[in-house]
Amino acid sequence: MPVEAERRVTPGLGFPALPGPQTAPLGWPGLDGLERRDVSRETEVPADKLDSVEAEAPIPAVAEPADVSRETEPSESEKAADAFARVSRDSADEDVADIPAVGADTPLAQAVANDTRKRITLVGRDLPRPSRTRVLTVANQKGGVGKTTTTVNVAAALAQAGATVLVIDLDPQGNASTALGIDHHAEVPSIYDVLVDGDPMSEVVQPCADIAGLYCAPATIDLAGAEIELVSLVARETRLKKAVAAYVTERAESGERIDYVLIDCPPSLGLLTVNAFVAASEVFIPIQCEYYALEGLSALLKNIELIRDHLNPDLHVSTILLTMFDGRTRLSAQVADEVRNHFPDQTLKATVPRSVRISEAPSHGQTVMTYDPNSSGALSYLEAASEMAAQNAAQNSEDRS
């Protein structure tokens, strides 16, 4: 038998080999510990016994060929995907029946079916406009519930559907201005100049470049000091109301009526938020589907009642939107049920899911409505906007009466 040379294991990263027996990683024995076979000493089977050995060896079974003639039934998600592929704008009404029911057997099939229905019924269609300007304050004392995200995306969805929308960024962080692609550095005229210096709103409003009919009054870092500066001013709680009323009247006289004014508030009840409550007649509350959101909602309703009793008797909660909804968790469903039980008329049927696309859009200076209009988040905000537009019918009937 030939003599084998001594083997050594060389470690990685160029380290030199260590003397003696080595151990390989993950507990495997080293090469020196392996048993060596001397194939020259293995016993050969005699020729006279070869037939008996072959007879004892089992014959492997041959698998039968698969029956490819039978076609498997496609899943509900595949049906939904195929149905959506057949849908076009011209034949949308004819293909709606091909979409599987919402109560399909899997959550994925339900999501695909719901998104497909939203695309067919909502994308590219004009929504009814209100007979008069609706001023809504988007507020929630709890932070991180999606106030700014809801404000800019609902505004973008309404503008894409034919409405003229003004977004007032009342948060010193200026996130709404960022999402709409509006410059809001220190030298830019902002809502601070309107509140503190009394400048007209028309001097600070800028159009959104991506969406026609969408305008924004930006916020700058100067707004952080407005809370202190407003304390010594006369009629400090009504300064935003007067500025908004004057701007809406000015646009109406020029033939370019503002349909919606959405005011994005900071997560606190300071003078900025009080100005927003006094300037609006409706409160739009985004609620995160978490337990803490219910506690924040009860505190917010108490403050709204105080504002209504002392400063703005027309203020009322008109719209509640459930955000960051996760249909896989029981907690989200319980929070949604609680909110809908207490506010059946104000809570929208639409829910906004957790979506990476919604979070990515502001980094590109866009809303999700333009960043990824076919995503589930964009379709959810479009559905919420359509429900808000449906509220206009009730408002228009009241105005006629």
Image (cartoon, rainbow, N blue to C red):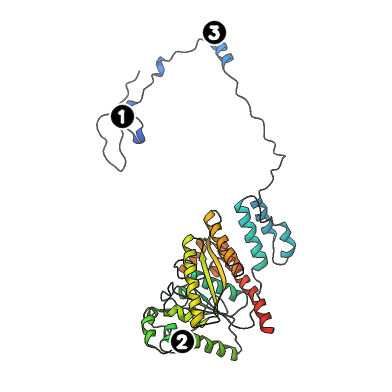
Mark 1 lies on residue: 7
Q: Residue 112's quadrant in the figure?
A: bottom right
Q: CA distance from mark 3 to mark 2?
A: 111 Å
Mark 2 lies on residue: 239
Residue shown at 63% from the left, 80% from the top: 130
Disc nearer the start of the sequence (2/1)? 1
Outermost residue toward the top in this view: 48
Q: Amino acid at mark 2?
A: Arg
Numbered mark located on residue 178 in the image? none
Secondary element type, mark 3: helix
Percent coordinates x, y for residue 180 in the rendering: 50, 74
Q: Is residue 1 visible?
A: yes
Percent coordinates x, y for residue 248 in the rendering: 55, 87
Q: Is residue 8 above or below residue 127?
A: above
Q: In front: 126, or 42?
A: 126
Numbered mark located on residue 48 in the image? 3
Secondary element type, mark 1: loop
Q: Residue 228's quadrant in the figure?
A: bottom left
Q: Is residue 348 above or below residue 131?
A: above
Secondary element type, mark 2: helix
Q: Is residue 352 above or below residue 187?
A: above
Picture quarter with the C terminus? bottom right
Q: Is residue 216 visible?
A: no
Q: Nearer the viewer, mark 3 or mark 2?
A: 2
Q: In front: 108, or 348?
A: 348
